[in-house]
Image (cartoon, rainbow, N blue to C red):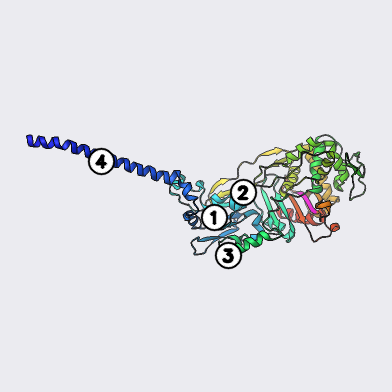
Amino acid sequence: MSEYGGFQEGGRPMARYIRHACAFCTLLLAALLVNAARVQVVQSRVYTDNPANRRAEIARYGHPRGDILVGDEPITGSVDTGEQLRYERTYKDGPLYAPVTGFASQSYGTTFLEHAGDGVLSGTDPMLSPLPLWNDVTRGLGPAGNVVTTLNRKAQEAAYRGLAGRKGAVAAIDPATGRVLALVSSPSYDPGVLSGNGEAVASAWARLNHDPEKPMLNRAVRQTYPPGSTFKVVTAAAALDAGLVTDLDARTDSPDPYRLPGTTTRLTNEADGCRDASLRAAFEWSCNTVFAKLGVDVGVQGMVATAGAFGFNDTRLRIPFSVAPSTFDPHVDRAQLALSSIGQYNTRATPLQMAMVAAAVADRGQLRTPYLVERTTRRSGETVAGSAVHPVRQVLNPSTAERLKELMTDVVREGTGRRAAIPRAQVGGKTGTAQHGVGNTGVPYAWFVSWAQADDSLEPQVAVAVVVEDASANRGEISGGGDAAPIARDVMRAVLGR
């Protein structure tokens, strides 16, 4: 008994030691798990972003990238190189779509849709995975998804073909929805030459960046130009909304030449018959003096408000990549306001912005925010996300929009924009020849903004802006009606199916 009892007494300290050891081991295990969780979750970004860690980069290029689609057809692809960074990006009709796709380069990153849609295209977007939290822990990449654009293939091709390598840009949108139908910049480049990471890619990068023609500049959304006489659409809208003009055919009190307020500078016109011309005649023949005076009569506050309603001075526009803000200077004197009101001085606009102006006129004064992505999908084609709700704002009174449509229709029917006419369709337009350079000695930019609606359609179907920088043309040979209007016409015909 005592022997067994002694054994039991001696066993108690032993059991206590075992319990303590178990508890200590449990604490160690818990500490290891906590540290593993800290490394895997809390500090994962530190290790992932460490330049010495190539696992993420190798994993990123370890499977084919998702595609960008126009309609149902991909305009991108991936090729297996067999290298450590296995898959490189390829492009179908690269120069045609470069202003939309941008590039996806192993050396230089991503731009435009390749950048804005990178989460879907690389497979890292949590919405692509049925178990996103598990993917966050494992850092695994699921199959890449696709980005479906709003582009109209035929309109895109017509715009690119029309520019024919000349410096310039085209933007086309659907006024009724805001869908971007064409986005072209010229001259362009093949983004596929930047996809890899070898010496050839570095050489192509240096060549493209030093090219004086700037082929990688997206002139449609990242370059602003003086809009010239196309801005008279905005000035006419401001004057009509303010009630300064109530009758399109009434004579205006507009001298020719017009002395800029507070100066001895006299503004003249290219056309004859602008003295006291009606708004209809002044718009049709683009009388500078009439619109400069109208802008002064509206005043800085009114002109800034109307330009702002159309989208000028907006730094937040994304389609989904950012758009350079178009500007109308709010800090001008009366002489500067006169020049600003005819699209000169500090007034600057992207082609996309001027397409938005035409779209608002076409759609009863309503402006829908433009967008380029229709939806994103899984590789199987299942929709992950559709286009978000795009706000609509009333830019100008519907009655004002109707009168502007009438003025723009007159320009195409019997004015400077006759080359934009399309059979069996109502077409409105406005030409522009924007001066630039020191002392306005540079070759003018040719502008044309327009909209079109088929005779059997209940709503406008396309709004277009074209700008051509033709440095090879003589100063007297370039005009919106001669150079830009035929390009706009072909884009509109492509959309209308004519």
The stretch drawn in magenta includes residue 159 = no
Reading the image, the residue beneath label 2 is 373
Question: SS at mark 4?
Answer: helix
**Amino acid beneath label 2:** Val
Question: Where 330 sits versus 202, above or below?
Answer: above
Magenta segment: 445-453
Q: Do residues under tags 3 and 1 come within 8 Å of each other at their CB atoms? A: no
Reading the image, the residue beneath label 4 is 21
- Between residue 426 and residue 350, name the one nearer to us: 350
- Between residue 245 and residue 192, name the one nearer to us: 192
Looking at marks 3 and 1 on the same chain, the residue that comes earlier in the sequence is marked by 1
**Amino acid beneath label 1:** Gly
- Kindly report the distance in space between the C-alpha atoms of the residues bearing marks 4 and 2: 61 Å
Reading the image, the residue beneath label 3 is 199
Residue 66 circle label: 1
- Local crowd size for mark 3, using a 10 Å CA cut-off: few (<14), some (14–19), many (≥20): few
Q: Write the residue at 65% across / 62% down.
A: 207
- Kindly report the distance in space between the C-alpha atoms of the residues bearing marks 3 and 1: 26 Å
On the question of residue 454 being in view, the answer is no
